[in-house]
Structures are given as structure tokens and as C-alpha cells.
Amino acid sequence: MPSLHAFFRELFQTFLGDFLRIAEPDLLVHLLPEQARYPVLDLAGWSDEERAALGAVADVPTRDGRSATVLIHTEPEPLAPAETSRRLTRYFLALEAKYVQPVLLTTVWLRGGRPGVNLESVSVNPLLGVEMVRIFYTAFGLGECRAEHYLERPEPLAWALAALMRPARRGPAAHRGACLRRITDSGLPDRETTLLRACVEDWMPEPGDVFSVDNTGPGLPGWGSSAVQGSSDKRRSER
């Protein structure tokens, strides 16, 4: 099984349009994700491991003839504020400097944090405790979202992500089956179907699971486990 970062990078690149429709619907009307390119990242001073952990990076044309860099970074759960600031600042500055165009940052938390899509921000290198610049980003907390809402959405990606969310009307086995049926009955191409099914079969949590980034099986804390709680500046969409 691929690592967490490798799997979700491929998933979000394959279903970039779906992801933006779910997480950035207001911006999507200005973007052309079907024309996106996925550059090979050559970032000076970055190790292979750091580049792999960066996430899905796409160069997305805009409808006014320009382009934006989209980064979808996946974490098992929210990091401490200082580490979140360090990482996202480094990601933002590296991508902005390399491609010299706007950077749209999103971080996906598989567990913990506020449910749903929220606007967050981090301070960039404060000077003697004085805040100079803030970076805004979208945080998408999956674990406590309403699974049924996403299973009923039209985007195939939502059906797979629903497996990582909390079901209100079904037990885990029934919920797993509902997600797989929605995917199997969709008539999608084999590669896309296989990728979505892998999200359900390999990453759906079970009670008592323990997370590992270099996953070799389900490894996220099961429903009901404690998790770090993130803060939010503004809700962006329905949970």
C-alpha cells in the first residue's frame, strides 16, 4: 500500500475538479481544473521525503487567462500551531517563489480539527512577537463530518471521502458497503473506480486503529478517539 501522502496526492490530482467543487466552490467558477498541469517539483534544498509530503500540486488556468498554483496537503490530524505555521509558510513561499503566481493552500485533516471546510490562517515569521504577515488557507476536517451528506453529493470523490467520516444512520460495516456500492454503480473508468475503492477499503478507520504515515493498513484513530482541535476564523461551507 502507498504511504498516506502518496495515496492522497494521487487521489486529489485525479479528482481535482471534484475536490475544488467540494472545498472551494466560490473559487471554482474562476478556475479550469480540467486543464490543470501537475509539475514535477524541483525545489532546491528539499529532500525527496519533504517533496513527497508536500501533497498534490497543480498549475490551474483561470478563466481570465492567468494561472494559480493549487496545493492540497494531507495530514492525519492537525499539527501544533507553531508547526502548522512553519510548514505552511515554507510551502507557500517555495511555491510562490518558483511559479510567481497566486497559491491556493488547502490542508486536509483525516482526523481532528473542526469538521468540514473552514478558513484558517497562520502568522508568517513574527518579529519579536509582532505579527507582520498572515497566510490564509482552507482546512478540511474529514473525521467528524456528516458522512451521509457527502455520500449523497454528486461528486465521486465525496463518496470515497465519506468513508473517512462519521456515519449517523449506519454502523461501520453498512457504511462501508454503502460507499463501495455508490462507487461501483457509478460507471466510472476502471482506474478511477479502483482509486476510489482503495480509499474506502484501505483508509476507512476502525475503532482502536493507530495512525502511521507509512501506512500498511488502516491506521487512523477510530471514531470516538480524542484528537487535537484546531481553530477556525470563518466557516466556509456546510459540514
Image: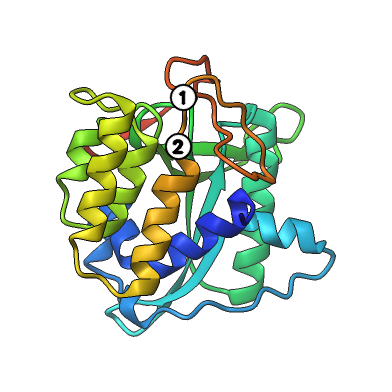
Q: Earlier in the sequence, mark 2 or mark 1?
A: 2
Above or below residue 167? Residue 225 is: above
Amino acid under disc 1: Ser
Q: Quadrant of residue 53?
A: bottom right
Would you name the residue on which mark 1 appears? 231
Residue ID at (28%, 24%): 171
Q: Can residue 147 be seen by looking at this rendering?
A: yes
Q: Nearer the viewer, residue 72 or 105?
A: 72
Residue 35 horizontal/vertical position (percent): 36, 83
Residue ID at (19%, 63%): 186
Check disc 1: other Cα within 10 Å, few if <14, some if 14-19, many if 20+. Answer: some
Q: Nearer the viewer, residue 201 or 233?
A: 201
Residue 132 horizontal/vertical position (percent): 62, 40
In space, the residues marked 2 and 1 are separated at their CA atoms by: 7 Å
Would you name the residue on which mark 2 appears? 120
- Element type at mark 2: strand
Amino acid under disc 2: Glu
Residue 121 horizontal/vertical position (percent): 50, 38
Determine whether label 2 and label 1 are within 8 Å by CB: yes
Above or below residue 139? Residue 157 is: below
Q: Quadrant of residue 140?
A: top left
Above or below residue 99? Residue 103 is: above
